[in-house]
C-alpha cells in the first residue's frame, strides 16, 4: 500500500516540532516514500528550504500549513477568545493555491493575531481556491463538534467547508492515537459524516518527531516552550502517544479498516503540483524621469558622476573601465538594480544621514563610485570589478551591494524605500535563533530540574563553536564525565536531539526585501513582535534570494552615528561645516595620531593589539590602513611582523618571478588580498579577470574539481607566458594556502576609510569627537568611565552632570576644552525623565532651586529611584549639598 504523510510538523513549529528538515526528508526516503507535505503551525517558515531539499532527494514536496481558525471572527480579540480556536490543515495544489495560502497566513498574522495567528471562515471562503483542506486533529472544528455530540452541526460544517475549497478538495482526517481519549469517537463520527456527505476520508499521523523513541525529547522541547513543571501530571504532553513518522505498513495496520483513507493520500499527492519558480529575478520597478529609458537614465547619472569625480577630461583608462562595467551591467540585466540602490543612497545623503563609503566587494565597481553609492576610487586602489560582479559565472545572481548607515537613522532609509515602492512591498527579513550546544544543555538541564551550577559546569566544558557530538569526541574531561554520570548521560541524550532546533523567530539585523508586487502575493509576512506594526518576511534571507526577490542589507553602524554626531557638534560649537569627501587623505596629524596608538574610539583600530602594531608600523599612507584592517584577523595576523619590517625597510622581500613584484610589492611579498591572487592569475597565467575570479572562488571555497581544473590551466598559462613549469607549480603551491587568510581588499578599503575619517575627527576635533563617542556608549557604565579616563589623558575635562546645563548626551562647552556629562547616561534615569527636564528647562528657563525643579517637573516621570540617581550623580550640586537632599528625598517627592 502506497502512503504519503500529509500532516507534518518540523522544528519551524517553534518549540513544538522536533524534526529538522534534512533528517525529516531522509526519514521519508528511508521509508520508501516519494512525497511528503510540510504543515507547520500557523506559519510557512520552512516552505522554500523544504521544497529545495525535497527536490534534491527526488521527493515530491507539498507545501502546506496547519492554520488556526477563530471560533467567530479573526478580528475579535477579547480575553479568552483564543480558548476556542480550531486547527485546519491546508495544502497547496497550484499557483493559485500558493498565493491564497500566503494571503491566509499573512492575514492570520496581521489581522487575526491574538496569542496565535487566526484565520476565520470569511477568509477561508475568500481564499479557499487552489487548496486541499483536511479537518486536522481532534482540535479541528468538526472533530470538536463530534466530541460535543453535535453530529448534525458537524455534518453541516463539513459541507460548508467543502464549499470553501470545492468538491474533491476537502477531506475528513483520521488519525490513530491510542491514548487520545476522543480519537476513536472522532474517527467513527468522521466516517459517519463521510457516508452521509460523500466527502472523502484521509489517513494521517500528526507528526511532531521522526522516531517513536524521540517522544521524550519532544516532550522536553515542549517543556522548554511552556515552562511547565516536568512532574506536573496535568501539564500538556504528547509523550503518551506516537506522533512519529510511521511506515506505510503501520498506517495500514492502524487505519486500514477505513475504506479509501490511505488511498486518498495518493489522490491528494496527485492534486498537489505546485512548483516554486526559484532564482527568477523579481526586481521592483524603477521609474526613470519622463523621456528616459532606465538604461539612458543610468548612463546620464554615470556621465554626471564621471565629471564630478574626474573632471571634464577623464583618462582613457577610466572611460574604458566605465564602458566595460556598464556593458556587463546591461548584459546581465542589472540596470534597474543600480538605479534602485543609488536612489535610496543619494536620498539618505541628501537628508544628511551619514552613509558608509561602501562595504564588501561593491567598492571594486567604478559605476558604484560614479553613482555615489561608494566613496572609494577603485582604480586608485586597484580594486577589481570582477571580484564584485563576474560575468563569467555560470549562475549569475543579483549583485550584492550592502550599505552602512548611521544606526540611529537607519529606520528612516527603510521608511523612504517603503514610501518609494509601497510599504506593502517592503519588509525586513526574518531570522531564527537555534538551540546552540551550550544553551541547549542549560535548557534541558533546567527542565530536568538539575541544579543550575551543575548544568553551567557542563555547558562551560563545551568549547565555543563546537557542537555536542564534536565536544564529546574531543573534550576528554566532558567525555569521561558524561560516560560516568547517569544524570549527565540523560541530559546529553536529550540535548543532542534538540541541538539545532529553531527556538524563536526574530528580525534579521540588516536584511530588507523589496518586492515588485505586494509581498503577500509572493511571500507570507508577519509583524516582528506584538508591539511592532512593521513587516517581516516569513522566509529567511537565503529563501528570499532563492525566490529571486531583491534582498538588501541596510546595516546600522554605530561609528557612523558617532561621525554624524561629531559633525553636528562641530557645526554647533565652531560654526564650521565639514564635508568628509574633501578631507585630505595625507593628513599628517591623523597619521601621527595612529602612530602614537591613540586610537580609542577609532573604527577598526581601537584594540590594544592594533594600537601596539600601529606604534610599530608608523603608518604614513592610506594603503597602510587598508593593510592593517586586512591583517588584523586570526589568519593573516601571523604576517603583521613581516609587513611592519617591510614598511620600515628592515627587510627586502624576494619574489619567485619578476612579474610578482608590482603585484605583491605594496604588501611586502604577502598575498594579503584576494584581488592580488586574481592579478597573479591574470599577469602570469593569462587568465581573464572573470576566470581569475573563478579561480579565487575555487581556492577560497576549496571546490576540488574546480581547483584541479584551475591549477592545470594556471600552470599551462604560465608556460605559455614563458614562465618555467617548475616556477609555475611553485607559485601555485604558494597561492593555494593564501585562501585561508587573504582578504577582500574592496571591503578592507571601505572600512579603512571609516577608520581614517574617525581618526581625522579625533585628531582635529578631539572634544567634539569624544563627546559624541561617550554619548554613543551612554548605556554602558563601565565604558563611559573608561572613556572619561581617556578624556583626562587627552587633557579634556568631563564635568559632572548639571540640571541646568546637561542635555540627553554629552555636550561640548564652547570655548573650553570641556565636556558636560549627559543626563541619559545616569543609571536609573529613564528617557522620559530626561526629556521632561530638557523640555521644561527649554520652555521656562533654568531651575532656580530644588523646590522649583520639583514643582515644574511632571511627577509621573520622576520617582524615588530616579530622583535619588539624579542627586547622587550631582545634578543638583550647584544648588544644594548632596547629603541634605538624600536625607529629605521623601519630603521632596511630596512637593
Image: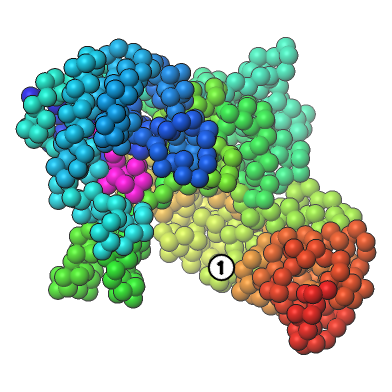
Q: Residue at x 83, y 71 (%)?
A: 854
Q: Is residue 385 above or below residue 258?
A: below
Q: Is residue 139 above or below residue 522?
A: below
Q: Residue at x 26, y 63 (%)?
A: 231
Q: Provide the secondary structure element on which disc 1 rests.
A: loop
Using the image as rendered, state which of residue 729 and residue 306 is in the foreground: 306
Locate the N terminus by quadrant: top left
Q: Using residue 622 as the reference point, say whether residue 30 is left or right of it.
A: left
Q: Residue at x 24, y 24 (%)?
A: 172
Residue 840, how many percent across, how many down? 86, 61
Residue 621, how many percent across, how many down? 65, 56
Residue 150 visible within the image:
yes
Q: How many marks?
A: 1
- The part of the image, by quadrant, that contains residue 58 is top left
Q: Which residue is mark 1?
A: 607
Q: Is residue 149 above or below residue 124?
A: below
Q: Using residue 75 as the reference point, say whether residue 2 is left or right of it.
A: left
Residue 17, how many percent across, how many down? 29, 45
What segment is highlighted magenta in the picture?
7-20
Residue 597 visible within the image:
no
- The part of the image, by quadrant, that contains residue 210 is top left
Residue 399, how many percent across, how many down? 51, 32
Q: Using residue 725 as the reference point, say whether residue 643 is left or right of it.
A: right
Using the image as rendered, state which of residue 886 and residue 375 is in the foreground: 886
Task: Please tell me whether the stretch drawn in magenta is mainly helix, strand or loop.
Answer: loop
Q: Residues within 10 Å of mark 1 (few under 14, many from 20)?
A: some
Q: Is residue 519 in the magenta section? A: no
Amino acid at each position: 500500500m502506497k502512503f504519503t504523510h500529509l500532516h507534518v510538523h518540523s522544528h519551524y513549529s517553534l518549540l513544538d516540532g522536533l524534526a529538522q528538515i534534512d533528517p525529516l526528508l531522509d526519514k521519508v526516503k528511508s521509508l520508501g516514500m516519494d512525497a511528503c507535505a510540510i504543515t507547520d503551525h500557523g506559519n510557512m517558515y520552512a516552505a522554500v528550504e523544504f521544497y529545495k531539499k525535497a527536490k534534491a532527494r527526488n521527493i515530491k514536496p507539498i507545501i502546506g500549513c496547519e492554520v488556526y481558525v477563530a471560533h467567530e471572527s479573526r478580528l475579535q480579540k477579547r480575553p479568552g477568545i483564543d480558548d476556542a480556536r480550531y486547527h485546519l490543515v491546508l495544502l497547496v495544489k497550484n499557483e493559485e493555491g500558493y498565493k491564497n495560502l500566503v494571503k491566509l497566513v499573512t492575514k492570520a498574522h496581521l489581522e487575526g493575531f491574538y496569542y496565535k495567528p487566526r484565520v476565520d471562515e470569511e477568509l477561508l471562503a475568500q481564499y479557499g481556491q487552489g487548496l486541499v483542506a483536511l479537518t486536522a486533529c481532534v482540535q479541528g472544528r468538526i472533530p470538536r463538534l463530534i466530541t460535543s455530540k453535535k453530529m448534525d452541526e458537524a455534518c453541516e460544517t463539513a459541507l460548508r467547508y467543502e464549499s470553501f475549497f470545492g468538491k474533491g478538495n476537502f477531506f475528513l482526517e483520521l488519525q490513530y492515537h491510542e491514548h487520545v481519549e476522543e480519537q476513536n469517537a472522532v474517527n467513527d463520527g468522521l466516517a459517519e459524516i463521510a457516508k452521509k456527505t460523500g466527502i472523502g476520508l484521509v489517513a494521517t499521523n500528526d507528526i511532531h518527531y521522526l522516531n517513536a523513541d524521540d517522544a521524550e525529547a519532544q516532550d522536553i522541547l515542549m517543556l522548554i516552550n511552556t515552562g511547565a513543571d516536568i512532574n506536573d501530571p496535568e501539564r500538556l504532553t504528547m509523550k503518551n502517544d506516537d506522533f512519529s513518522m510511521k511506515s506505510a505498513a503501520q498506517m495500514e495496520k492502524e487505519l486500514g479498516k477505513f475504506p479509501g483513507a490511505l488511498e486518498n493520500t495518493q489522490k491528494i499527492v496527485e492534486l498537489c503540483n505546485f512548483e516554486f519558480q526559484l532564482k527568477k529575478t523579481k526586481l521592483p520597478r524603477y521609474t526613470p524621469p519622463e523621456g528616459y529609458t532606465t538604461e539612458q537614465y543610468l548612463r546620464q547619472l554615470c556621465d554626471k558622476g564621471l565629471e564630478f569625480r574626474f573632471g571634464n577630461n577623464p583618462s582613457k583608462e577610466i572611460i574604458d573601465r566605465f564602458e566595460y562595467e556598464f556593458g556587463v551591467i546591461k548584459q546581465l540585466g542589472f540596470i534597474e538594480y543600480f538605479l534602485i540602490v543609488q536612489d535610496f543612497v543619494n536620498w539618505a545623503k541628501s537628508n544628511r544621514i551619514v552613509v558608509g563609503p561602501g562595504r564588501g566587494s561593491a567598492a571594486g565597481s567604478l559605476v558604484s563610485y560614479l553613482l555615489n553609492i561608494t566613496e572609494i576610487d577603485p582604480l586608485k586602489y586597484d580594486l577589481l570589478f570582477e571580484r564584485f560582479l563576474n560575468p563569467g559565472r555560470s549562475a549569475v545572481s543579483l549583485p550584492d551591494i550592502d550599505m552602512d548607515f548611521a544606526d540611529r537613522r537607519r529606520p528612516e532609509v527603510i521608511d523612504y524605500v517603503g514610501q518609494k515602492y509601497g510599504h506593502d512591498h517592503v519588509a525586513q527579513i526574518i531570522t531564527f535563533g537555534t538551540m546552540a550546544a551550550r544553551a541547549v544543555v542549560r535548557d534541558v538541564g533546567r527542565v530536568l530540574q538539575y541544579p543550575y551550577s551543575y548544568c553551567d559546569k557542563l555547558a562551560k566544558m563545551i568549547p565555543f563553536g563546537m557542537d555536542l557530538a564534536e565536544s564529546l569526541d574531543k573534550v576528554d574531561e566532558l567525555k569521561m564525565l558524561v560516560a560516568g554520570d547517569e544524570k549527565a548521560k540523560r541530559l546529553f541524550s536529550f540535548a543532542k536531539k534538540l541541538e539545532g532546533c529553531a527556538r524563536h523567530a526574530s528580525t534579521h539585523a540588516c536584511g530588507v526585501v523589496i518586492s515588485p508586487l505586494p509581498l503577500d502575493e509572493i511571500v507570507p509576512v508577519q509583524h516582528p513582535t506584538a508591539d511592532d506594526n512593521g513587516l517581516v518576511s516569513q522566509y529567511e534571507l537565503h529563501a528570499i534570494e532563492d525566490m529571486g526577490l531583491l534582498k538588501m542589507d541596510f546595516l546600522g553602524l554605530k561609528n557612523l552615528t558617532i561621525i554624524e554626531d561629531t559633525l553636528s557638534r562641530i557645526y554647533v560649537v565652531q560654526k564650521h561645516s565639514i564635508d568628509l569627501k574633501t578631507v585630505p587623505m595625507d593628513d599628517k596629524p591623523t597619521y601621527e595620531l595612529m602612530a602614537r596608538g591613540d586610537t580609542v574610539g577609532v573604527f577598526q583600530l581601537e584594540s590594544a593589539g592594533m594600537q601596539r602594531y600601529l606604534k610599530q608600523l608608523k603608518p604614513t599612507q592610506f594603503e597602510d590602513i587598508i593593510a592593517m584592517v586586512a591583517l588584523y584577523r586570526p589568519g593573516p595576523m601571523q604576517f603583521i611582523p613581516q609587513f611592519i619590517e617591510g614598511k620600515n625597510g628592515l627587510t627586502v622581500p624576494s619574489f619567485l618571478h619578476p612579474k610578482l613584484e608590482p603585484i605583491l610589492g605594496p604588501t611586502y611579498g604577502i598575498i594579503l588580498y584576494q584581488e592580488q591572487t586574481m592579478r597573479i592569475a591574470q599577469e602570469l597565467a593569462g587568465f581573464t579577470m572573470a576566470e581569475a575570479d573563478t579561480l579565487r572562488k575555487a581556492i577560497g571555497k576549496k571546490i576540488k574539481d574546480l581547483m584541479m581544473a584551475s591549477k592545470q590551466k594556471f600552470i599551462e598559462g604560465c608556460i605559455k607566458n614563458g614562465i618555467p613549469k617548475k616556477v609555475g607549480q611553485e607559485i601555485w603551491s604558494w597561492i593555494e594556502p593564501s585562501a585561508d587568510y587573504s582578504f577582500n581588499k574592496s571591503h578592507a578599503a571601505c572600512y579603512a576609510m571609516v577608520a581614517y575619517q574617525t581618526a581625522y575627527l579625533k585628531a582635529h576635533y578631539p572634544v567634539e569627537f569624544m563627546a559624541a563617542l561617550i554619548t554613543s556608549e551612554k548605556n554602558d557604565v563601565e565604558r563611559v568611565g573608561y572613556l572619561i579616563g581617556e578624556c583626562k589623558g587627552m587633557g579634556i575635562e568631563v564635568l559632572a552632570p548639571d540640571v541646568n546645563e546637561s542635555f540627553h548626551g554629552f555636550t561640548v562647552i564652547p570655548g573650553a576644552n570641556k565636556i558636560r556629562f549627559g543626563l541619559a547616561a545616569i543609571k536609573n534615569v529613564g528617557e522620559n525623565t530626561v526629556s521632561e527636564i530638557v523640555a521644561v528647562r527649554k520652555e521656562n528657563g533654568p531651575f532656580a532651586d530644588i523646590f522649583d525643579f520639583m514643582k515644574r517637573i511632571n511627577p509621573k516621570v520622576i520617582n524615588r529611584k530616579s530622583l535619588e540617581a539624579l542627586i547622587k550623580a550631582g545634578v543638583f550640586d550647584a544648588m544644594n549639598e548632596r547629603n541634605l537632599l538624600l536625607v529629605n528625598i521623601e519630603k521632596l517627592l511630596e512637593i
